[in-house]
Image (cartoon, helix red, strand yellow):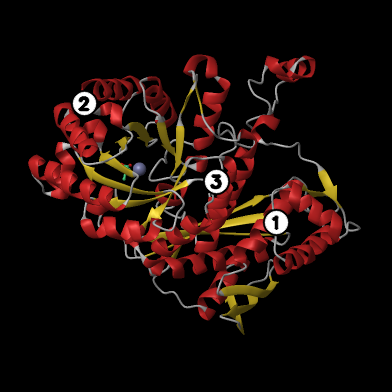
Amino acid sequence: MTDTVLIFDTTLRDGEQSPGCSMNLEEKLRVAAQLETLGVDIIEAGFAIASEGDFEAIVAVARQCERATVASLARAAIPDIDRAWEAVQHARAPRIHSFIATSPLHMKVKLAMEPDAVLERIRQTISHARNICPDVEWSAEDATRSDRDFLARAIEIAIDSGARTINLPDTVGYATPEDYAAMFREMIERVPNSDKAVFSTHCHNDLGLAVANSLAAVAAGARQVESTINGIGERAGNAAVEEIAMAIKVRRDALRVATNVVSTEITRSSRLVSGITGFAVQPNKAIVGANAFAHESGIHQDGMLKDSSTYEIMTPESVGLTRSSLVMGKHSGRAAFKEKLKELGYELGDNAFQDAFVRFKALADAKKAVFDEDIVALVDDEVLRGHDNIQVRDVEIHCGTKGPQRAILTLAIDGAEKTVTATGNGPVDALFKAIRELVPHDKGTLQRYEVHAVTGGTDAQAEVSVVLSEDGRSVRGTGAHQDTLVASARAYVNALNKLTVKRGRAPLRVAEAG
Ligand code: KIV
Ligand code: ZN
């Protein structure tokens, strides 16, 4: 029988923790619902003690999930573990995931703890966690730079105290596949009670080896892989769920394991996370990049026409990619639009559907050909903004060679409409100054402003992404519209809304963040 490798998705915790990736509660719930449809086994929904917002999101995800185990991260401290339990106890299958660093560097510099005290702390906290929750995972932060004798001792204590999953993270993305596999082999062999736990991988991508390292550990006996959609996460990110799942599916002959991932849900999951976070997927990204199934060279195209297996090791359909198709024009009605939304994986409530339909009609009037990508951009833009406290109502721009350029902007702030006129050095500058006047945020600075076209053609919708930062926190906002400046206003305002959410979240000390 083929072993199953459990997929532990940490998009909502390690992914969301990375700069510019924050999500609000409604967004987290949408991602969690899609993760369940994708078939991941465990959803790490957040870090309960980090903020009230994280806590509420974990509770909501725990209540919503019907099948997946829901986990919360917790440091090796009783209040953290209690808070994690308070949040996940609502899940059908709750898990507490506690961690402490085990490398000499982290123990000395970050924790200022003697190794023996760390072992004692593992015993106390894991026993406590296991007394309140039947499913406990323990992580040895910076495992790959830990002393092997000490690591083996720590794992034995964690299992003895009740941990059912032992995660050995490559926290700093330092390992090579050989190192990482050897560590798993050694720990599974030498820790006397290792058969009582599932061993888990958690790889960061600093050297571009996160997926290779995770798979090497699977070959060495790991049976849980921690990963994120699109590989989002701290610094260079985490191992990407879609790459792990497809490598295991396509190379089953070599890896001899399986996952519960429904591969045809991969593209939809990737688009949802990139739409919500505003983190665009690089075009040549494996599995979900725009070029992942594109064949440009003549020789390749010729081969593909004769037999697609000449240059494709998996079909686009197997990852849920449908060929870009012309969907509708201005004569398409509500029923056709609803059907299209269903096909693209959206189920909108009445109000959201009505708003999306009005925008679709406006787009179809302005643009002859409306493609699937247009609808996805439009609906993500509309739905994601539904709960924002600040909303863009009206944008009017005067621009051209004779400056100064002028923006007249109306925002609805907590339901009340306010209008202002501002001038600037170019239309974008004028527009963003107008936003600053209506919503002062002196400490917030614009880090990045990017525009790209959703499809080809001069009538393409613009998708704008901005990164704002304030007091060391950064957020990314996105907006889509056939008018680039309206999309810009929507993106900036979306980021401002996210900044407001983040203000309620005190940054954790580096030593505690994990
Ligand atoms: O990278 C890491 O070590 C982590 C742990 C907290 C699991 O994210
Ligand atoms: Zn991590």
* Residue toward you, 198 or 100: 198
Q: Residues within 10 Å of mark 2 (few under 14, many from 20)?
A: some
Name the amino acid, label 3: Leu
The residue under label 1 is which amino acid type? Glu
Q: Is residue 424 visible?
A: no
Query: Which residue lies at the image location 83% right of the left edge and 47% below the top edge?
Result: 327
Task: Using the image, tell me which numbered label, if any, was put on residue 347.
Answer: 1
Q: Residue at x 19, y 29 (%)?
A: 152
Are discs 3 and 1 less than 8 Å apart at CB?
no
Marks 2 and 3: which is nearer the front? 2
Which badge, 1 or 2, comes first in the chain's sequence?
2
How packed mark 3 is, by other alpha carbons closer than 10 Å (few <14, some 14-19, many 20 or more), is many
- Above or below residue 194? Residue 377 is below
Side of 62 relative to 316 (left or right): left
Residue 388 location (% of width, % of height) = 56, 70
- Of mark 2 and mark 3, the one earlier in the sequence is 3
Where is residue 21 shown, x and y percent of the image? Answer: 47, 54
How many other residues sit within 10 Å of disc 1, few (<14), some (14-19) or many (≥20)?
few
Residue highlighted by disc 2: 191
Q: Which residue is mark 3?
A: 35
Residue pictured at 55% horizontal, 70% vertical = 432
User: Element at badge 2?
Assistant: loop
List x then y, in percent, for residue 286.
56, 31
